[in-house]
Amino acid sequence: MKQIPLILALYVLQCCRPTEATVSLNVSPNRQQFFESEFISLSCEQSSAGWKVKRRRGRGGTEECGGEGGFGRFDGSSCSLSVLSSDSGVYWCETVEGERSDEVHITVSGPVILEIPALPVMEGSDVTLRCRAYRLSSLPAVFYRNNSFFRAAPKGQITISNVQQTDGGSYSCFIAIAGNSPESWLAARVVFCPYCISTVLMVSLYRSRTTGNKSAVSMETAQRDGGDQGLDEDENFVADVTTEHDF
């Protein structure tokens, strides 16, 4: 029992120790699919620390925003561009040393797109998916997950409440008068709770100390009772011998 708090303590120290700051690529508007000519902005959380926005299209090489032969316009903190179908690809943030953020898949198409978050959503949150036809909105749509029917939406949007990791997968949608959207991935991120782990640790330590104190008291009581009983037996034995041999 005494080893459990030690194991938890080591686990908490491992999880909660200072680590290098992580960076994610922020996409505005926050989605993965866009119509042509839409204006989007891409930024890194620590662009001031030397982070750059980069991308890879198809089998091509790596391109840098604002760089020679690159794409978009970089103003020192964000990358902006009016997208075309040729801008579809994988985007991320990267430092000179080669440290990278998670990738975001951006798709530029038409006539139908699925509005789905660019970044993983927190487990337990609500997320809304919208199916849109070019220059039209609120049309009836059918949503698919992993190429199977998921839900029908008379107004073209659905909300997934209390998102769990099992809700993750490849989503797409269909509008009868316009067609299908591309597929995009929805991911749910588990919420890390250092407070919960600390609480468990404190409770375990308290229980361990309480159990230890009770054991010590019990042993002390047992020893004292045993000692008193021994003294009583010795006294009775002496009294008996004195009585038997009373001269």
Image: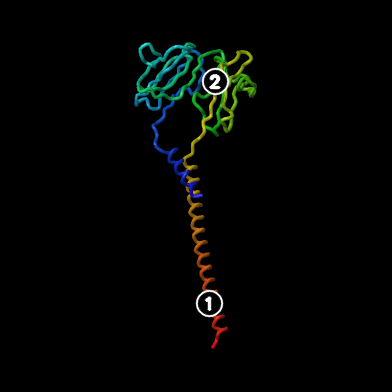
203 and 27: which is toward the camera:
203
Three-letter amino acid code of the residue under disc 1 = Glu
State which quadrant residue 53 falls in. Answer: top left
| SS state under label 1 | helix
Percent across and percent down for residue 175 are 62, 16
Total of numbered circles in the picture?
2
Spatial CA span between label 1 and label 2: 89 Å
Image quadrant for the C terminus? bottom right
Residue lying furthest bottom: 247
Q: Residues within 10 Å of mark 1 (few under 14, many from 20)?
A: few
- Name the residue rendered at 54%, 83% in the picture: 242
**Which residue is under mark 2?**
184
120 and 218: which is toward the camera:
218
- Whether residue 36 sits left or right of residue 143 in the image: it is left
51 and 59: which is toward the camera:
59
**Does the image show residue 77?**
no
Percent across and percent down for residue 114 are 56, 19
Percent across and percent down for residue 136 are 57, 16
Tell me, what colour scheme is on the image? rainbow
207 and 42: which is toward the camera:
207
Q: Is residue 63 above or below residue 17?
A: above
State which quadrant residue 146 falls in. Answer: top right
Q: Is residue 95 above or below residue 15?
A: above
- Name the residue rendered at 49%, 19% in the picture: 105
Q: CB atoms at circles 1 and 2 under 8 Å apart?
A: no
- Name the residue rendered at 38%, 27% in the picture: 46
Three-letter amino acid code of the residue under disc 2 = Ser
**Which residue is under mark 1?**
235
**Counting residues from the N terminus, which is met first, the one under dot 1 or under dot 2?**
2
